[in-house]
Amino acid sequence: MAERELTLLKEMDYKNGYSVYIGIPFCPSTCLYCSFTSYSSEKFGNLVDEYLKVLQEEITYAGSCLKDKKLTTVYFGGGTPTTLSAEQLDSLLHHVENTFDFTYVMEYTVEAGRPDSITYEKLKVLKEHRVNRISINPQTMRQKTLDLIGRKHSVEQVVDAFYMARQLGHDNINMDIIIGLPGEDKEDVAHTLREISKLNPDSLTVHTLALKRAARLNTEKADYEDLEPVDTKAMLQLTAEYAKEAGLMPYYLYRQKNMADNLENIGYAKLGKEGLYNILIMEEKQTILALGAGASSKFVFHKENRIERVENVKSLKDYLERSNEMIERKRSFLLENKNNL
Ligand code: SF4
């Protein structure tokens, strides 16, 4: 894995480049285990237009920040970026492309994430904008688990979204699954892997459930106690075997606190379909300008071997009210440090 990472890093001029992360903090509903900045579009949908207006201002500012560096990757995450309408997505992507120089961009990712947010029109917009990597995340292919974890979409929606994306020519599709979901055993994971192998995604990211303090699964722990997963190590082993059979090779790994059995997250991909942004962020190799509510910019000082973070506020309300401050935080940091970057 380390060798593969090194080869990929060598191919990118990562020291003279930077990446951009743009967060869309809305989702169709809130998953039981969620610890990200996420607001259900049902409750907060009326704030999406205002959010996009403020975000576009931050993007405009970010476009002027690192003019002497080459943009390597652009990543839309969240939340679920495809919670936006096709028109909103189109206009946001236009704004990004008009703001940054895309000449050297190697990877342009939009997490389509939740299948219940995906439509033909949105996938078409992404294709037209030459987004070259998307993620359609089932987490599990067991309907009973999807219902339990509040994903509010069906297994069929995952399959339909995947085929729709392929039909439109998306040729780099990642799928995320989670090991250790409440009530799941080894057979459930085997089932999920069998169903995913029929789709043949270009990469598979295997997460081990990490119980973060704020997640409902943690705060409402007592309700799920008898659904504790067993044998997560064996489940992880199954995913490794599946990946090997499917021609997906491991290319990155990271550990977080509070993961079931202290296990890890692993990214598997076909050759040439690795998520470059994932490597850059996990290995902390490149400056990442992160924009939007809850986004945390990371500045890498290669010569001094140090990293500094400049964080945006997490709450949507604060972000909307204090957007100028988010720009100001980056501006003053860069004024002081730009020459050493
Ligand atoms: S899709 Fe992701 S960001 Fe959205 S609620 Fe679920 S876990 Fe959170």
Image (cartoon, grey):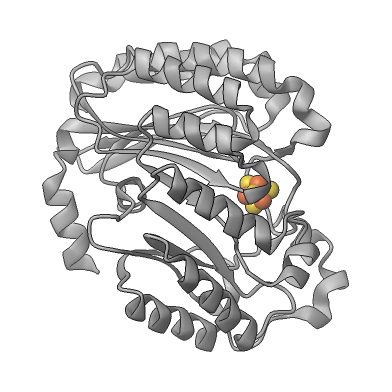
Q: Which residue reaches farthest right?
A: 223
Is 332 positioned to the left or the right of 338 in the image?
right
Residue 106 position (above or below residue 195): above
Counting from the top left corner in percent of width and height, residue 331 is at 40, 14
Residue 44 falls in which quadrant of the image? top right
Residue 336 position (above or below residue 236): above
Say which residue appears at 54% left-offset and 28% top-offset: 312
Quadrant containing the C terminus in the rendered view: top left
Residue 15 falls in which quadrant of the image? top left
Quadrant containing the N terminus in the rendered view: bottom left
Counting from the top left corner in percent of width and height, residue 137 is at 56, 56
* Residue 324 visible in the shown view: yes
**Residue closer to the observer: 28 or 222:** 28
Counting from the top left corner in percent of width and height, residue 82 is at 59, 36
Say which residue appears at 40% left-offset and 28% top-offset: 128
Residue 83 position (above or below residue 276): above
* Residue 310 visible in the shown view: no
Say which residue appears at 42% left-offset and 66% top-offset: 200
Numbered label tally: 0
Counting from the top left corner in percent of width and height, residue 153 is at 73, 55
**Residue closer to the observer: 225 or 151:** 151
**Residue closer to the observer: 324 or 136:** 136
Is 152 positioned to the left or the right of 333 in the image?
right
